[in-house]
Image: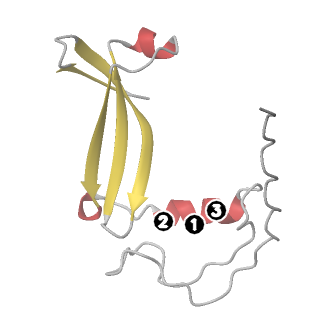
Amino acid sequence: MALETPLEHESGVIVRYHRILEARFNFLHRVLEVHVEGFVGEEIARAGKRPLQTETVFIPFDALTHDARGFLYPMLSQLPTSPFVDAVPAGEPVGSIGKSGIPELTTKAKLRPALPPMPPAPVPPP
């Protein structure tokens, strides 16, 4: 999935194929930060080449039609590799971002034991 629209790069090259690299929810500032990679064409992107440009778009929470936490919290509690597997819902109801933009946890979730810390990387001899 991607977007196709011609945008002129500062070098004059037309970048036509754009795909989302990363999306980050910032609950403090109430925005969804989306990083989009731009390629000359789809074939370049599929060949694993580096993007020619990267754009960042900030989408205010007020523009969202759904509260993404309604998707994220269930995934955190269902994904087998998540430390929150089998966690139970707590805090403000899903479907409402609320004034704080951050869910308030009012009950303890069942959590698996934390993984042990990674050992330090070996230091090569001088």
Q: Amino acid at mark 2?
A: Arg
Pointer 3 residue: 76
- Asked if disc 2 and disc 3 are in contact, CB closer than 8 Å, the reply is no
Circle 2 sits in a helix, a strand or a loop, which is it?
helix
Outermost residue on the front side: it is 126
Q: CA distance from mark 1 to mark 3?
A: 5 Å
Figure label count:
3
Residue 55 figure quarter:
top left
Looking at the rendered structure, the kind of residue marked 1 is Tyr
Q: Which mark is residue 69?
A: 2
Q: Position of residue 82 (x, y in %)?
A: 72, 59
Find the distance from the CA under tag 2 to the CA under tag 1.
6 Å
User: Label 3 sits on what residue type?
Assistant: Leu
The residue that appears at 61% across and 64% down in the rendered structure is 74
Q: Earlier in the sequence, mark 2 or mark 3?
A: 2
* Residue 64 figure quarter: bottom left
Mark 1 near mark 3, Cβ–Cβ under 8 Å?
Answer: yes
